Image: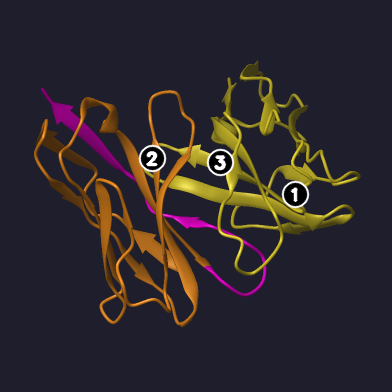
Chain colours: A orange, B yellow
Amino acid sequence: AQTVTQSQPEMSVQEAETVTLSCTYDTSESDYYLFWYKQPPSRQMILVIRQEAYKQQNATENRFSVNFQKAAKSFSLKISDSQLGDAAMYFCAYRIIQGAQKLVFGQGTRLTINP
Amino acid sequence: NAGVTQTPKFQVLKTGQSMTLQCAQDMNHEYMSWYRQDPGMGLRLIHYSVGAGITDQGEVPNGYNVSRSTTEDFPLRLLSAAPSQTSVYFCASSPWGQREYEQYFGPGTRLTVT
């Protein structure tokens, strides 16, 4: 069974600094997606960034980038120039490409931004 | 488009009561699913559907029933509520396809079972 592990229950960072959230996963599949979702206090799940396993280039979306290490099964999220609005729970998630679009989520990391 | 809507937003039940959480989407998505979110455990898949009349179990299906009679609606039924079902419930939808990656989440329903 696929599993996703986020080993940092909480992280904090000073505003304008850079922070990295960690995620590891376990799978025997070769073709899959990895995602980072943001959940602010409103509870809404917001897709931040995605990575397709067959692509070697790390995904980037504005201030958000990932470090995808397929052999190590590691998928970290880097937030640059942290802003107060980045404060939220962040979830790492995985799904295989084949079959149903079932997401497997990690436990989440609560990110606090200090002004 | 309203996107994915869920009702109610909050609900309190007594142990043994039954109820239905409603989920609807207006994007003509084939794939719909239900997750529950518990503290420290992330979101876990309860049931999912790949189209009208087709449903299947996810990771934590016990105590829940689903049906999909239309493309738009995917209700989640709690047959006999238990305190262990206290959680936040999310419905999500997506176009069907291997390379379809975006899942659209509803705003969630917070359920408390006393």
Identify which amino acid the numbered label 3 is placed on.
Arg
Horizontal and vertical percent position of residue A54: 43, 79
Which label number is shown at residue B29?
1
Label 1 neighbour load within 10 Å: few <14, some 14-19, many 20+ = some
Q: What segment is highlighted magenta in the picture?
A: A96-115
- Is A65 one of the magenta-colored residues? no
Residue A7 appears in the figure: yes
Protein chain holding label 3? B
C-alpha span from label 1 to label 2: 22 Å
Protein chain holding label 2? A
Label 3 neighbour load within 10 Å: few <14, some 14-19, many 20+ = many
- A91 relative to B50, above or below: above
- Is A112 one of the magenta-colored residues? yes
Q: Which residue is mark 2?
A: A38
- Nearer-the-camera pick, A39 or B45: A39
Q: What element does badge 2 sit on?
A: strand
- A13 relative to A78, above or below: above
